[in-house]
Image: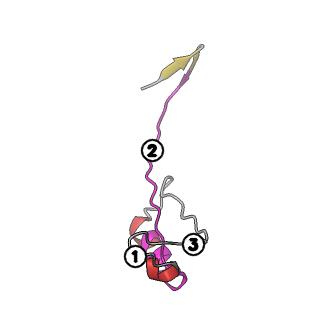
Amino acid sequence: MPKSTGGAEYTDDFIPKSELDIVVTDDQAEAMIDGIRGSTRMGAIGDGKIFVSDVNQVVRIRTSEIGDDAI
């Protein structure tokens, strides 16, 4: 539905977005990326993006495990 601001009409066609934060070990990363890309790609604007970043440390509070053991 068109809206108006000071005489100019516009339409807000926003696509709902979701964010997933997934932490995997380095050796699982490529398979995870491929799986997400393969199951979500529709070939349309709004398919999304995958950001890959390092996690410096992981600590499981309950057991005090650190690193890959905590994942």
Which x, y percent locates residue 29? 51, 78
Local SS, label 2: loop
Which x, y percent locates residue 44? 48, 56
Which residue occupies 49% across, 82% down? 68
Q: Which residues are magenta?
A: 9-36
Local SS, label 3: loop
Q: Residues within 10 Å of mark 2 (few under 14, many from 20)?
A: few
Which residue occupies 51% across, 53% down? 45
Q: Residues within 10 Å of mark 3 (few under 14, many from 20)?
A: few
23 lies above or below 30? above
Mark 3 / mark 1, whichever is N-terminal: 3
Which of 47/53 is in front?
53
Which x, y percent locates residue 34? 47, 76
Q: Amino acid at mark 3?
A: Gln
8 lies above or below 69? above
Residue 9 falls in image quadrant: top right
Gap in Å between the C-alphas at discs 1 and 2? 41 Å
| Residue indicated by mark 1 | 63
Numbered mark located on residue 15 in the image: 2
> Which residue is most to the top?
6
Q: Amino acid at mark 1?
A: Thr
Mark 3 / mark 2, whichever is N-terminal: 2
